[in-house]
Amino acid sequence: MTLDCPGLHVDQEHHVQRRLAPALALVAVTALALTGCAQDFGKGPEGKVTEKVKDGKKFYLVVDPAKGGAEKKFRVSKYDYHDCNRGSKYPKCIDD
C-alpha cells in the first residue's frame, strides 16, 4: 500500500526554500565582499620606479616623477607591487 501525500511534498519544498534562502543570501554577500576587496589605490605620478617598500601587508612604490619634483611614495596593491620593478616606468609597468 502506497500513501500519496502531495501536501507533505509542498510543505517540504517550502521548508527547503526557507532554509536555502538565507544560505543563498550569505553566498551572495560573501561573493560581493570578496570582489569588493580588490584594492583600488589612486595612481601615483608618471615616472621611474626607484624603490619598492613592503610594510607588513602594505605595499608601496617610490617614483621619481618624469616631470621633475621630489620622489613620491604611494601605496599600491600587491599585484602592482610585484608587476613594477626598480627602474621600470610607472604606470606602464602596471598596464602591461
Image (spheres, rainbow, N blue to C red):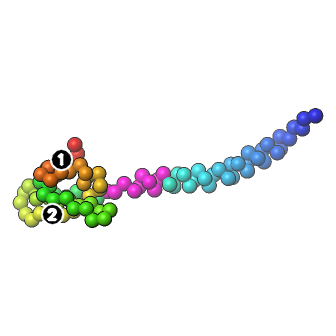
Q: Is residue 77 left or right of residue 16?
A: left
Q: CA distance from mark 1 to mark 2?
A: 17 Å
Q: Report x, y in % for residue 50.
A: 12, 57
Q: Is residue 15 left or right of residue 37?
A: right
Quarter of the image that includes the C terminus: top left
Q: Report x, y in % for residue 16.
A: 70, 48
- Report if the CB atoms under discs 1 and 2 are less than 8 Å apart: no
With respect to residue 9, does 76 lie above or below? below
Q: Report x, y in % for residue 79.
A: 29, 51
* Residue tagged 2: 72
Q: Residue at x 44, y 54 (%)?
A: 34
Q: Which residues are magenta?
A: 31-40
Q: Give, as a three-letter code, the residue at label 2.
A: Lys
Q: Residue at x 54, y 52 (%)?
A: 27
Instruction: Describe the element under mark 2 as helix, strand or loop.
Output: strand
Q: Give, as a three-letter code, the residue at label 1.
A: Lys
With respect to residue 53, does 7 lie above or below? above
Q: Report x, y in % for residue 41.
A: 28, 59
* Label of residue 92 in the image: 1
Instruction: Describe the element under mark 1 as helix, strand or loop.
Output: helix
Q: Is residue 35 magenta?
A: yes
For label 2, the crowd category at 10 Å Cα-Cα, with few meaning under 14, some 14 to 19 and many 20 or more, is: some
